[in-house]
Amino acid sequence: MPRVRIYNTEAIVLRASPLGEADRLLTLLTPGIGKLQATVRGVRKTTSKLGGHLDILTRSSLTLAKGRSLDTITGAEAQETFPLVKGNLEKLSRAIYLTDLVDSLCPLEAPNPPVYTLFLDGLRALGIEADSDLLLRYMELQLLSLSGFLPELQRCAECHGQLAPSQHLWSPIAGGVVCPACSASRPGATNLSLNALKVIRFLSTATVSSATMVRVNGPLHRELAAIMDTYLRYTLEREMRSAAFLRSVSHARAYAGSRPSENESGVPAGH
Amino acid sequence: MTTNDFHPTAAPVARLIEEFHKLPGIGPKSAQRLTYHLVRMPAEEARALAEAILAVKERIILCSQCQNLTEVDPCPICTDPSRDRTILCVLEEPLDVLALERTHCYQGLYHVLHGAISPINGIGVEELKIREILERLRDGVVQEVVMATNPNLEGEATAMYIQRLVSPLVKRVTRLARGLPVGGDLEYADLMTLTRALQGRQEF
């Protein structure tokens, strides 16, 4: 069979870095090929025909030409630009975090269509959801599940025994929930409330729409964020920079002393 | 020495090729071409180039006010008495200062961030000259901050983040208008650009 030199695919742009005089190297998430790296020529010039169609967090229909090492994007048309996400700093910082998570958990050229669908659903939900902290936890658990890193939530991750109610701890090293007896052999195991366990069990099997209907209070939000943070740090073996950016944004909110508004792009009306 | 250790290029030549190859946009072939061009160049020209490279590294510093590259601190733009001190334009890179100066339309001061927020590429808030903007605004002279970061996701994130920090300190925070580029083609314009061009249309 002759090798196909030109192919079409849909993709979401995850990452972009400058290359050469006016080119860019893009990291894309596609439904059929998985994560993919491709170059796009002359895209940093203001008159580039492709530039606006290939910004980060844009879903585009692409035409690519096979290259020796990297493929080159020869055509692009934006399908979805997520303006609700990009016009609000809180939502944008969360979307950047999700993008970082997808990029970190997906290996290159390993097709995983459910990850693509989940990421797309997540970005759409982020645009319309007012309280998106729980959406982040849902996305973390689902992305971990689809990439094979879902923590053990039903039984003790160490001895596989049944967990008695209120008798469980969280141990990223063991890979999830552990019983008090096993936690002794696992340093760094932290307390996990029954409510937090119930929420993450629910989120690990829920759909986007049902996950965003759950309402939890402030302390439980913080507990969930903290246990997922320790688990992700252990699984990825690093701290994600986008998590630090999330924190900077909430500090900036406290500094400015203002409540987040829907459109705060700093653009005067009419521009 | 076995035949396997034989290299067709002399060690200093190979070293220069390697050094050129580290530069952005220089591939192995370009690196070779530049190196052999230098080999054939008169000695004084080669020396002038080497001295120019060293001068850049030894004499160029960051202006303590605008953070732009300069030989004297504060830089000539920051000390120019004819510049409007009530308006501050925030840019990503030193090259953007040159681009704006070429327009001869802007008389205010600049502030160079040295990048844009890009957590995925490892650039967070701490890596940029953001804290320095807040320090410059403290005396209350600046009335308007113009966000002139690039019109892409990272530039927008940076602009929104800085807008949030500086808005309690100044009267106005503005953003460069976005629309159709001169020499562009309407049919190729993307949705975002066209939408903004329509929203920002002006009286003819």
Image (tube, coloured by chain):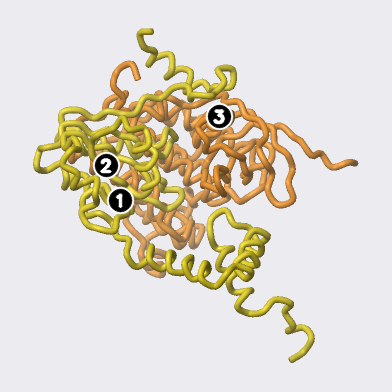
Chain colours: A orange, B yellow
Across and down, in percent, residue B185 comes to 57, 20
**Is B135 rendered above or below residue A8?**
below
Residue under mark 2: which chain is it in?
B
Name the mark on residue A53.
Answer: 3
Dots 2 and 3: beta carbons under 8 Å? no
Do tags 1 and 3 sit on the same chain? no
How far is mark 2 from mark 1, CA to CA? 8 Å
Q: How many marks overall?
A: 3
How far is mark 1 from mark 3, CA to CA? 32 Å
At label 1, counting other C-alpha atoms closer than 10 Å, the crowd grade (few under 14, some 14-19, many 20 or more) is: many
Do tags 2 and 1 sit on the same chain? yes
Q: Residue furthest left?
A: B139
At label 2, counting other C-alpha atoms closer than 10 Å, the crowd grade (few under 14, some 14-19, many 20 or more) is: many
Disc 1, SS = loop
**Is A120 rendered above or below residue A268?**
below
Disc 3, SS = helix
Q: Amino acid at mark 2?
A: Tyr
Q: Which residue is mark 1?
A: B68
Q: Amino acid at mark 3?
A: His
Can residue A45 be seen here?
yes
Which quadrant holds the C terminus of chain B? top left
Do tags 2 and 3 sit on the same chain? no
Q: Nearer the viewer, mark 1 or mark 3?
A: 1
Residue name at image x 23 percent, y 30 percent: B173
Q: A169 or A146: nearer the eye?
A: A146
Q: Which residue is mark 2?
A: B110
Residue name at image x 64 percent, y 69 percent: B40
How far is mark 2 from mark 3, CA to CA? 30 Å
